[in-house]
């Protein structure tokens, strides 16, 4: 009786342990463990759906000078850049997603309706990229870029034609 009970318990433990594994959890070669103390970042892909492509011309980004507490709004075409006065800081807009969603490692838009607008931007200072990320209209502090002098906020977006 004890042997049957032990056998049953071991079988159940094995089933639970193996049942937790699935194909979704298998590690891909790009997801191997990083050396101790380092964090690996999964590569994300931006997909601009066909119903969004070409529908938006530009975004309006407020740049706050923290020393003067003055906001200047820059209208930057998607795929273009603007150099701030002084010439050492450049702001590039790579993509705009009107209804930003994250599906696994894919960043995309659920629709062309501006329900969660987000702009993918890069900030270059003295020729070196110091930030590449997203600005969100509805959540301006989410993943906000921290710069000692400037703050950046997505204010608005401009439809094409």
Image (cartoon, rainbow, N blue to C red):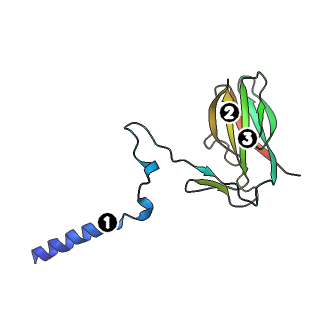
Tag 3, which secondary structure? strand
Q: Nearer the viewer, residue 38 or 68?
A: 38
Q: Where is residue 132 drawn, in percent x and y?
A: 63, 38
Examine the rendered structure and indicate whether residue 109 appears above or below residue 154.
below
Residue at 85% of width from left, 51% of height from top?
160
| Image quadrant where residue 109 sits | bottom right
Name the quarter where the N terminus is drawn: bottom left
Q: CA distance from mark 3 to mark 2?
A: 9 Å
As drawn, the label of residue 123 is: 2
Mark 3: few/some/many CA within 10 Å (<14, 14-19, 20+): many
Q: Where is residue 89 drawn, in percent x and y?
A: 71, 27
As drawn, the label of residue 35 is: none
As drawn, the label of residue 93 is: 3
Q: Which residue in the structure is indicated by mark 1?
A: 18
Q: CA distance from mark 1 to mark 2?
A: 46 Å
Q: CA distance from mark 1 to mark 3?
A: 46 Å
- The answer to whether residue 36 is seen in the rendering is yes
């Amino acid at each position: 009786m004890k042997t049957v009970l032990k056998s049953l318990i071991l079988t159940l433990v094995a089933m639970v342990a193996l049942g937790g594994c699935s194909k979704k959890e298998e590690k891909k070669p790009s997801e191997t463990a990083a050396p101790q103390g380092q964090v690996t970042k999964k590569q994300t892909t931006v997909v601009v759906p066909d119903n969004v492509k070409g529908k938006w011309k530009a975004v309006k980004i407020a740049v706050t000078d923290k020393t003067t507490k003055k906001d200047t709004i820059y209208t930057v075409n998607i795929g273009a850049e603007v150099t701030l006065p002084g010439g050492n800081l450049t702001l590039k807009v790579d993509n705009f997603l009107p209804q930003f969603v994250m599906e696994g490692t894919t960043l995309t838009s659920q629709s062309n309706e501006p329900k969660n607008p987000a702009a993918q931007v890069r900030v270059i200072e003295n020729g070196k990229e110091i930030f590449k990320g997203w600005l969100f209209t509805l959540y301006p502090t989410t993943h906000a870029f921290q710069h000692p002098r400037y703050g950046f906020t997505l204010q608005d977006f401009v439809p094409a034609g």
